[in-house]
Image (cartoon, helix red, strand yellow):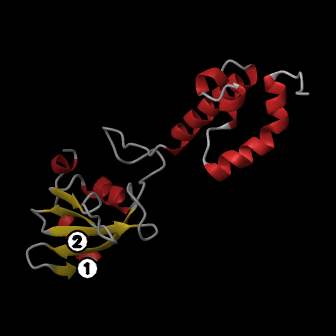
Amino acid sequence: MPSAKPLTQRCALLHPTIERVRVRFGQTPFADFCGAPWSAAAALQFPLMRRAAVLLALAGCLVLVTCAPESPSATSRTSLNGPRDDYDATVGRFGPPDEDDSTDRDVPRPPIPTRWITYKKEHVRFIFVPDGKLGDPPPYRWKLLGSTDPRTQRPISPSLAVQRLSTRNTKEVGR
């Protein structure tokens, strides 16, 4: 004689068997057999599921806030603690460059992106590379690689670059 237990109780007893059959033969989920809610809207009717959903949403917001990259302020790229990297230190010392170019957003991105800034009147170009692991995505912390004369494409010493840039007047730096 068949059991007089309600369908949901019988399904609860058969749950492991039904799940094995579903996995093996690709049938519909256990919830379809027993009428148990398995949609997100139906699951939120239970207080414990509501609390879990709220906690999950809060955790997601916390991750987004703490992992979001910092955007530079509109007025200055240097923070109160000093320059963020060699690029910020250079621009902070000599003012904004006449040209600023980078391969960090090229498609496809090169294995070692580079950034260079040029001060045309002083004939100085600074070249930067990322200070991180090979293949890291932007944003980068830029490390100074060296300086060149853009006219001759030859390296120049740091002291010569500083000497040439010392002629920049303060009006250009405040641009």
Farthest residue in the bottom direction?
A: 154
Image position, residue 49 (x, y; %) = 70, 26
- Near mark 2 (Cα within 10 A), the count class, few <14, some 14-19 or many ≥20, is many
Splitting the image into 4 quarters, where does residue 91 fall? bottom left
- Quadrant of the frame with the N terminus: top right
Relative to 50, is 77 above or below? below
Q: In this figure, which residue is indicated by the disc labeled 1?
A: 157
Q: Residue visible at 64% across and 28% down?
A: 53
Q: In this figure, which residue is indicated by the disc labeled 2?
A: 161
Q: Nearer the viewer, residue 86 or 11?
A: 11
How far is disc 1 from disc 2 in space, using C-alphas? 6 Å
Q: Nearer the viewer, residue 101 or 160?
A: 101
**What amino acid is found at the position of numbered circle 1 in the picture?**
Ser
Image position, residue 87 (x, y; %) = 33, 60
Image position, residue 41 (x, y; %) = 59, 22
Residue 8 is left or right of residue 104, and the answer is: right
Task: Check residue 121 in the rendering and tell me which mark sits there, or answer none.
Answer: none
Can residue 166 be seen in the rendering of this structure? no
Q: Residue visible at 57% across and 36% down?
A: 60
Splitting the image into 4 quarters, where does residue 146 fall? bottom left
Do the numbered discs 1 and 2 sit on residues whose CB atoms are within 8 Å? yes
Residue 142 is left or right of residue 97, and the answer is: right
Q: Secondary structure at mark 1?
A: loop
